[in-house]
Amino acid sequence: MSSGSWTSVHWSFQSLVWEGACFPAALQLRRATGNQRHKTSNAMRFSQSFASTALLFLAAGLAQAASFWGFDEGTVSVAAKKGSEGVKHKLSQRTPLSTPVALGTADSVKVVLTAKDNGKGKRPHQAFVVLKEQDSGLEAPFPLTVKESGKAVVQIAQKDLPVQFLLSEKPLKASVVIASFGSATGLNTPIFDIEVKTDPSAPLPAYEKPLRYGKQPEISHTFKSDPKNPPKVISLFFALAVLATVPALFIGWALLGANLNNLTKAVGAAPLSHPSFFGSIVAMEFVFFMYYTSWNLFQVLPVIGVVSVVTVLSGTRALGEVQSRRLAGEL
Amino acid sequence: MRSLLLFFALLWVTAVSAISTTGDRLLVVLDDVADKATYSKFLGDLESRGFKLSYETPKSESLSLFRLGERAYDHVILFPSRAKGLGPNLTPNVLLQFINANGNILLTLSSASSTPSSVISLLAEIDIQLPADRTGLVVDHFNYDAASAADKHDVLLLPPPSSIRADIKDFFGVGAGANEVLAFPRGVGATLGSGELLTPIVRAPATAYSYNPKEQAEVLDDVFAAGSQLALAAAFQARNSARFALVGSAEMLSDTWFDAEVKTVGGKAAKTYNREFAKRVSGWAFQEIGVLRVNWIEHHLNEVGATNESNPGIYRIKNDVTYTISLSEYSWSTWSAFSVPANDALQLEFSMLSPFHRLPLVLDPAHSNPEAAAYTASFKLPDQHGIFNFKVNYKRPFFTNLEEKNTVSVRHMAHDEWPRSYVISGAWPWIAGIFATVTGWLAFCALWMYSAPTDKKKVIKKTQ
């Protein structure tokens, strides 16, 4: 369908052409052009006003020959309860009602009109009020109960509306379709808008969209954040502080008179045991260093075995020598 | 993978001999076999496309859709029947079994007689509703053929079908000329349930409605359905990709309406699009178009220095991985590279219970050729170990269902795959601590063994 603005431009344009006309057939002509408007907007081929002008005159020519469905004495009212009458608005098949009709939760909209074929009251086969939701384009037809005379009535309560209509953010577009078999051209024109008022205290009816196969939203996994380090300056400062304890320890020992003066005596007393015992302690630290850098446990264990045998064998001799010096008061 | 290849090789062998991907045995069920003259062009088109047609009536005793537990036919066309039911050989249950056994059905309706009750039950099974009392006629007082239905308005003229959603490929209206309209003579409209397996092919214009010509000829007190809620042709594709197409008017497939001249309400002469439409609807129903095939699936590590092994069973968390899938689409008689419709996306899910990643697969021209298109995605595996699936779940209206799952394990980091402690700046004080302890220990050992007593010590002793 055409956009609203295009429609209104067209309508004002048409009234410019036809408002001054005072032929007896003027009403019919308007109906004719009204239908033609619907068809052209369906086709959307003639969006230029020049083309539609030409069409308008063509339709006017046709209007003399064929008959047209239309309606008269149309009113719309909103009743709070069945039976009671609300404010009536007069409907026109040329221009839709300018203000939307408000429909509350317990209310119902009542549309009354008289269908006419060429100005004579007659019963059409199709007499619908079609409500349309503007965003989705969903339409719901409500057939009018028509009498032989063409008098037609329909009452649409809010509970008769589909759920989607209650959740609509824009007003519903109501149009009337009057048509029947035979050669008479049907009428399909917007007549008013309905603003659905839902009870603000009650929850809105739930509407779950049916499952449709299609692409789904993309998902990207959110990774856990990487572990964070303190600023390097701080790490470096504390690493240096820890390292500074080593010279501090040495200085402390030196102040207390620590020395290695008995080294020559010890090596002289146990020339094999002392170097190999001390060497095995250093070697053990080296094994740990290799374990940290590259070796695995199965490489480390046999080497530890060898080193510890050396430690035990040489240690008994070396520490025995140390004990003898200590007993002699030399330590 | 090898069995998959063998399967496709076998599929290929069958595809070469038949026009359809699922077989060429087509059963045409008519009330009277002589009626086939009415549809001679339509049936002749099917025959020329390679189908082997058999004709039966619903009453025929020899009619059986199954033989020794296997399908006796690959496809069935059901033309309208004036009978109340379709007899014991075409019960709704048998027809459903036929669909479950990957058989395809094209069902046509007509408003000239009430629809057989077994057809109603079959349609009810797949959530398609027909008007009450099994009788309905679609009329539109605004879009009818002014030449043949100027008074009754029961021959609808519709624009050629277009895709109902922007991301769905248009299978049925692409061949239409500028001045072609679809004639829908004296047909039945149906309403579709909200299931995802159902898709309308042709919807009625906004002003069309369905009524019961027997009871509502004068006064229309209640409308079954109107406007776009009324499906004139609809498609149903089961989960096994068996297809069921409903055409509301059998007459639109008849010779009368193939390339016929019609006149729109505006007085413009137009040609009917029915022949091409009939070809496309039957082609879709009988798996000649919209059939997808997976040629191969490959995934591998996408990391510098990693081994380029295809389809490994195990990955590590946070590995960079590339996944590629090759797809072909069957179109009338050839397999061609499948191109994803505009606005649609082929998506890869990497999931354990629920998807961790859902990423679009993009065309990989390096691995594509005219017969097969490769789609690829590269991504980082999630930081969660477990059993995961690479999953392509491509289900779209009118395309056969694709659901491909490749399971891989994702292990956690091994102890020697973490960064070394000296790389971590926060560990520097602790490493320095170990160094200080080791140095102190060695120095202490030396002092313990080799330090000589000093005078200072004696002074301290004396004071004590």
Image: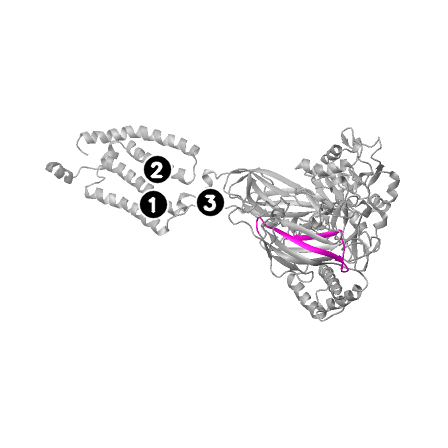
Cα distance in 3D space between marks 2 and 1: 19 Å
Q: In this picture, is B400 found above or below A57?
A: above
Query: Could you say which is closer to the camera, residue A230 or residue B384?
Result: B384
In this picture, residue B168 sits left or right of residue B43:
left
Q: Quadrant of the C terminus of chain B?
A: top left
Task: Single out the residue that lies furthest toward the front.
Answer: A84
At label 1, counting other C-alpha atoms closer than 10 Å, the crowd grade (few under 14, some 14-19, many 20 or more) is: many
Q: Amino acid at mark 1?
A: Pro
Query: Could you say which is closer to the camera, residue B277 or residue A140?
Result: A140
Local SS, label 2:
helix
Which of the chains bears the disc numbered 3? A
Query: Could you say which is closer to the camera, residue B26 or residue A315?
Result: B26
Residue placed under numbered mark 2 in the picture: A285
Q: Are marks 2 and 1 in contact (CB under 8 Å)?
A: no
Residue placed under numbered mark 3 in the picture: A224
Query: Which residues lie in the magenta part?
Result: A104-132
Q: Earlier in the sequence, mark 2 or mark 3?
A: 3
Which of the chains bears the disc numbered 2? A
Q: Amino acid at mark 2?
A: Glu
Residue A3 belongs to the span the image colors magenta: no
Q: Position of residue B410 (x, y in %)?
A: 53, 38
In this picture, residue B310 sits left or right of residue B61:
left
Q: Position of residue B43 (x, y in %)?
A: 84, 44
Marking on residue B429: 1
At label 2, counting other C-alpha atoms closer than 10 Å, the crowd grade (few under 14, some 14-19, many 20 or more) is: some
Local SS, label 3:
loop
Q: Are marks 2 and 3 in contact (CB under 8 Å)?
A: no
In this picture, residue B165 sits left or right of residue B287:
left
Q: Amino acid at mark 3?
A: Lys
Instruction: Say which residue appears at 25% left-offset and 28% top-offset.
Output: A320
Confirm whether circles 1 and 3 share one chain: no
